[in-house]
Image (cartoon, coloured by chain):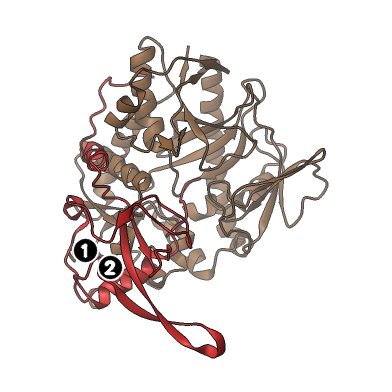
Amino acid sequence: VKKSVAVPLTLVATFASAIACGSSPETRQCVDGENRVVPDSLCARAEQAHPGSTGASTSVARGGGIGGAVFSLPYRYYYGGARGGLGSVVTGGGYTPHAGRGGIFSGRRSGTARGGFGGIGGGRGIGG
Amino acid sequence: MRRIASEPRRDWQRRVEEVGLVYHTQGTTPYWDESAHYRLTSDEVEVLERATNELHALCLAAVQHVIDADRFAELHIPELGAALVRQSWEAEPPALYGRFDLSFDGVRPPKMLEYNADTPTSLLEAAVVQWYWLQDVAPKKDQFNSIHERLIAAWTDLAPHLGGPLLHVAAMDDWEDAITAAYVRDTAEQAGVRTRQLPVADIGWNASRGRFVDAEEVAIDAAFKLYPWEWMLHEEFGAQLLASSATTRWIEPAWKMVLSNKGILPILWELNPGHPNLLAARFGDPGEMRDYARKPLLSREGANVTLVTANRPPETGPDGGYGEEGFVYQELAPLPNLGGRRPVIGSWVIQGESAGIGIRESDSALTTNTSRFVPHLFE
């Protein structure tokens, strides 16, 4: 198979360097108050309700408990650490993105609705 | 096809990281495994190439059949999905790639296990990492791999059909997915297409404009997405997909959800009974099959797949929460057992043509997200 010897990969190199330097820009998981992984859509909606509050705790009411009692859990993004499935507890990271992450994923929020995609994917692999 | 033990490059971790494979080890187990390689003959490569092209042609005919015979319900595809499939099949929006998983021992014809036509992974490993391995260890040998060049050529062809100058690339916040997305961006930019990457969850819907937008409110004319169609359909923005189909082109297009659905396996068998590259498959129950794989219609990464053989206890993949949507039953094609390693050929299709292979191997007959990628060459 004819192929050029060099395969230049500028963007891959950028991402790989960021990860190798520990800035881990790609690992972001939505977690509840006990650092259990929940669907990303919960965090995206929380951010939408409170633009610019990345990393801050936001309470979202959820139904539950005996007799229909209602309790609240905070949902926020957790940066770094190993990726886990829904319900797993993540460790090894924190609630603040590393330097460098913002350059890749940042963006101001507006009245546009967000978080309408990505909810099912949290904790599930897309590969075949 | 032989499995040859080989000495890993002394600094293999650094070498693969240099070309982006930072997820080369899972826990303490190498995901990238160059302590061996697969050696094929040129005749075997030709067999794989022919089978891949043949299977892709059969799959396109099967999509047409699903549309004409309205078999979406059997695939658990809701009416919205059916409408999107029909719309995209007619409009022919850009389609880039897919990966067949094949069972192949070098002797019998390759058998199609499934077609990852929507969000195939292990792209960087197949296109780039194993190529650099070859340059280091056996530069005079060849490799069945023109994936990189064909991706660039594909973007060159697709560029006029993206609806605008900017291609958005959306992936989940995950190292592997983000690197894969970055690699796709690299190939697009080398074809002269400007790109921007964003997390799937950052895709926005601006109701007043009737447009999907990115985090900077820039309208999304075309988006390469590493996110499955069947998930998009069932999420909040799914309701906007049909009305916006003329202004946002999703790559892969919606008709690929028919092929990434395991329900395509019994339909392919029904349309092409006895085809040498297909395995018997059926909906509902295993019928008279003694050894078979029970696969959820929408399973990924081997999750909730059960292998049933007459003389052994059933073997089930990890629980991914799949199965409520129903199952198909596929005749078992025992993977070659090469010293306890079971290879699956990932045969890449770029713009409808066979473009190369990557090989993943497991210690069991199930290929899952913990399988190892092993490079190959041919002579």
Q: Position of residue B185 (x, y in %)?
A: 26, 43
Label 2, secondary structure: give it.
Answer: strand
Using the image, name the chain to which the residue with label 1 belongs: B
In this image, A113 relative to B333: left or right?
Answer: left
Q: Which mark is residue B215?
A: 1
Q: Is residue B80 above or below residue B318?
A: below
The reply to whether callout 2 and callout 1 are in contact (CB within 8 Å) is yes
The image quarter in which residue B209 lies: bottom left
Q: What is the x, y in percent for residue B341?
A: 60, 27
Q: Report the disc number at residue B266.
A: none
Residue closer to the observer: B16 or B255? B16
Say which residue label 2 marks.
Answer: B204
Shown colour of chain B: brown
Using the image, determine if residue B362 lies above or below residue A95. above
What whole-number distance in Å separates the C-alpha atoms at marks 2 and 1? 7 Å
Q: Give the color of chain A as drawn.
A: red
**Rendered location of residue B179, percent (x, y):** 32, 43
The answer to whether residue A116 is seen in the rendering is no
Q: Residue at x 28, y 21 (%)?
A: A4
Residue A72 showing in the rendered view: yes
